Image (cartoon, rainbow, N blue to C red):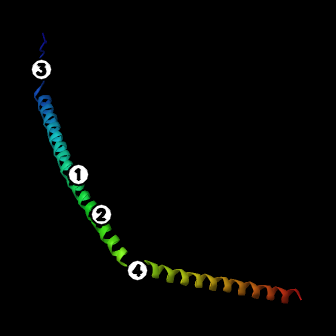
Amino acid sequence: MAETRHVKLNYEEALDAKKQILSAQLNLLQTAKRVRNYKVLRKRELTTKTKLKANLKSLRTKIKALQTSFPHEEDSIEIKTIKKRAQKRKDNDIKEQLKDIEKKLDNLNK
């Protein structure tokens, strides 16, 4: 059987203990409120993310459908030829610069 003991407290100690108990209860209620609020916000976040994911998926499919309607073969050939021309120009420019530097070096050595 449990034994019950009584402790005698003066008025100030009893009042302080009661204040501490009430303060602890208040803190627990505030924490419970924050946890509940967190759960609501988290649920809202997850639904928003799900909607966003679905919207992005439909957007991707629409973009792919648009891309398939564009003519790719002709564009890619034109782009490749333009890139080749630009590369040849760069190569020619570099060769010309090298020749100019070699001429200057020859003139300095004479």
Tell me the amino acid under the disc marked 3.
Answer: Lys
Residue 20 drawn above or below residue 74:
above
Which residue, as the protein is rendered here, is positioned at the far top? 1
Q: Amino acid at mark 1?
A: Arg
Query: Mark 1 against mark 2, which lies toward the viewer?
Result: 2
Residue at the disc numbered 2: 57
Of marks 2 and 3, which one's residue comes earlier in the chain?
3
Q: Which comes sooner in the sequence, label 1 or label 2?
A: 1
SS class of the residue under badge 3? loop
* Circle 1/circle 2 CB separation < 8 Å: no
Query: Which residue is found at the position 14% from the left and 37% from the top?
Result: 25
* Residue named by callout 3: 8
Residue type, mark 2 in image = Lys
The three-letter code of the residue at mark 4 reads Pro
Q: Give the x, y percent position of residue 23.
A: 16, 38
Mark toward the viewer: 2 or 4: 4
Instruction: Identify which residue is drawn at 17% across, 44% down.
Output: 30
Task: Give the residue number, with chain letter if any, for mark 4.
Answer: 71
> How far is disc 4 from disc 3 in space, using C-alphas?
93 Å
Q: Sequence-wise, which precedes: disc 4 or disc 1?
A: 1
| N-terminal-most mark, 4 or 3 | 3
CB within 8 Å, label 2 to label 4: no
For numbered disc 2, what is the local secondary structure?
helix
1 or 3: tag closer to the N-terminus: 3
C-alpha span from label 2 to label 4: 24 Å
